[in-house]
Amino acid sequence: MAEVISKSPVLLSESALKQLRRIKEEQKLDDTHGLRIGVKGGGCSGFTYVLGFDVEKEKDEVYDLDGMKVLMEKAHGIYLIGMEIGWHEGLNNRGFTFSNPNATESCGCGTSFNA
C-alpha cells in the first residue's frame, strides 16, 4: 500500500464529492476502493478522462481529498495537475465536469482534451 499524500494535484468541488460519496455508497464499495482519476488515449481531442472507483495498484499515488481516497498513476499527473472536477446539474444535462488548465484544446462534450 502506498503512503497517503494529503496535497492532491486535482481538486474536487463539494458537489462532485457529494455525488461521488453517493455513488460509492450505492455501489456498496468498501475502503479498499478509491476514486481513480486519470487519462487514457482516445476521444475526439486525443485524451479522455478516467473517473471511477477501483482498487489500489502498484503504480498508484494515493491522496486524501476531504476523506475521499483518490488513486492516480504518477505519470498522469502532468496532464491533470491543477484540474478541478465539478458536478453540473441542469435542465438539459447533468454530470461531472472537468476544468483542466493543461488542456490546449477540448471537444464540445468536455470529456476529451489535448495537452
Image (tube, grey):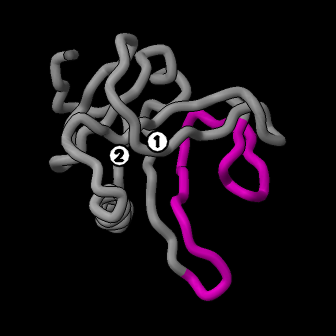
In this orientation, which residue lies closer to the viewer: 113 or 54? 54
Task: Residue under label 1, please give it.
Answer: 83
Q: Is residue 98 magenta?
A: yes
Q: Distance between the residues labelled 2 and 1?
A: 6 Å
Q: Are marks 2 and 1 in contact (CB under 8 Å)?
A: yes
Task: Tell which residue pokes out farthest to the front in this image.
Answer: 28
Asked if residue 93 lies left or right of residue 56, the reply is: right
- Looking at marks 2 and 1 on the same chain, the residue that comes earlier in the sequence is marked by 2
Seen at 78% across and 57% down, the residue is: 108
91 above or below 73?
below
| Quarter of the figure with the N terminus | top left
Task: Please provide percent x and percent y for residue 74.
Answer: 41, 16
What element does badge 2 sit on?
strand
Give the total of numbered labels.
2
In this orientation, which residue lies closer to the viewer: 32 or 68? 32
61 above or below 85?
above
Q: Give the quadrant of residue 59.
A: top left
Task: Please provide percent x and percent y for residue 55.
Answer: 34, 30
What element does badge 1 sit on?
loop
Residue 112: image tag:
none
Q: Give the range drawn in magenta.
A: 90-113
Task: Please provide percent x and percent y for residue 9.
Answer: 35, 32
Q: Which amino acid type is shown beneath numbered disc 1? A: Met
Asked if residue 76 lies left or right of residue 72, the reply is: right
Seen at 45% across and 37% down, the residue is: 37
Seen at 66% across and 49% down, the residue is: 111
Residue 11: image tag:
2
In this orientation, which residue lies closer to the viewer: 65 or 71? 71
Q: Which amino acid type is shown beneath numbered disc 2? A: Leu
Q: Is residue 21 magenta?
A: no
